[in-house]
């Protein structure tokens, strides 16, 4: 984490305080952002997003971290999966859509080291994924790579956190 911070700090001075970062299977929650004694919806949503990265980490034969750091395309694809989880979480929890535009700046800014310059591509991808889990959830959940989304849905169901229509 410290190493990663040194690496990223030059690009983004707020890295250690403003962002929740997953390295391998561990998430690092900036203490100012969440009080660990209070489990709130926002924290659960973030943890669900990070769960996708943990899942992908264990499925990538330990090369996930290196690829994530040094390949923009890999990082972009990993974050498309992560932000799809964020949108899916809002849908499952509250039955609300997220304006995919909300996330585009994460992809195109220094925040993740400019992992995708084409904001229109990101917008199109996120919108398509959201439309798919809303309109064709059964298909969404059986796509290759969909297992962590199924697990999260099941987790929310068990915890009684699914909205009534979910
Ligand atoms: Zn992420």
Image (spheres, rainbow, N blue to C red):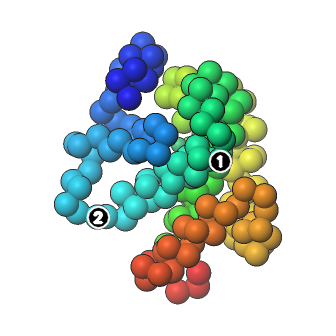
In percent of width and height, residue 147 lies at 67, 63
Q: Quadrant of the C terminus?
A: bottom right
Badge 1, how many Cα within 10 Å: few under 14, some, many 20+? few
The residue lying toward the viewer, choosing from 136 and 147, is: 147
The residue lying toward the viewer, choosing from 53 and 80, is: 53
Asked whether, in this view, residue 8 is left or right of residue 145, the answer is: left
In percent of width and height, residue 44 lies at 40, 61
In percent of width and height, residue 156 lies at 49, 74
Residue lying at 43% horizontally and 83% vertically, measured from the top left: 160
**110 is higher (above) or lower (below) than 133:** above
What secondary structure is marked by label 1?
helix
The residue lying toward the viewer, choosing from 4 and 90, is: 4
Asked whether, in this view, residue 149 is left or right of residue 19, the answer is: right
What is the tally of numbered marks visible in this picture? Answer: 2
Q: Quadrant of the N terminus?
A: top left
Residue lying at 32% horizontally and 44% vertically, measured from the top left: 29
Circle nearer the N terminus (2, 1): 2
**Which residue lies under the disc numbered 1?**
59
**133 is higher (above) or lower (below) than 55:** below
Q: Return the residue found at the far bottom.
A: 164
What secondary structure is marked by label 2?
loop
**Which residue lies under the disc numbered 2?**
39
**92 is higher (above) or lower (below) than 166:** above
């Amino acid at each position: 984490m410290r190493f990663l911070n040194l690496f990223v700090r030059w690009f983004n001075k707020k890295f250690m305080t403003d962002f929740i970062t997953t390295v391998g299977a561990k998430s690092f929650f900036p203490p100012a952002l969440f009080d660990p004694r209070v489990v709130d919806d926002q924290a659960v949503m973030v943890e669900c997003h990070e769960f996708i990265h943990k899942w992908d980490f264990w499925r990538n034969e330990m090369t996930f971290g290196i690829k994530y750091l040094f390949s923009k395309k890999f990082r972009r694809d990993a974050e498309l999966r992560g932000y799809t989880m964020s949108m899916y979480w809002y849908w499952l929890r509250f039955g609300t859509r997220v304006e995919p535009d909300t996330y585009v700046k994460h992809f195109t800014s220094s925040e993740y080291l400019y992992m995708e310059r084409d904001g229109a591509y990101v917008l199109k991808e996120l919108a398509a994924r959201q439309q798919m889990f809303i309109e064709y959830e059964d298909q969404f959940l059986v796509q290759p790579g969909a297992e962590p989304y199924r697990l999260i849905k099941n987790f929310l169901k068990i915890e009684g956190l699914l909205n009534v229509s979910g």
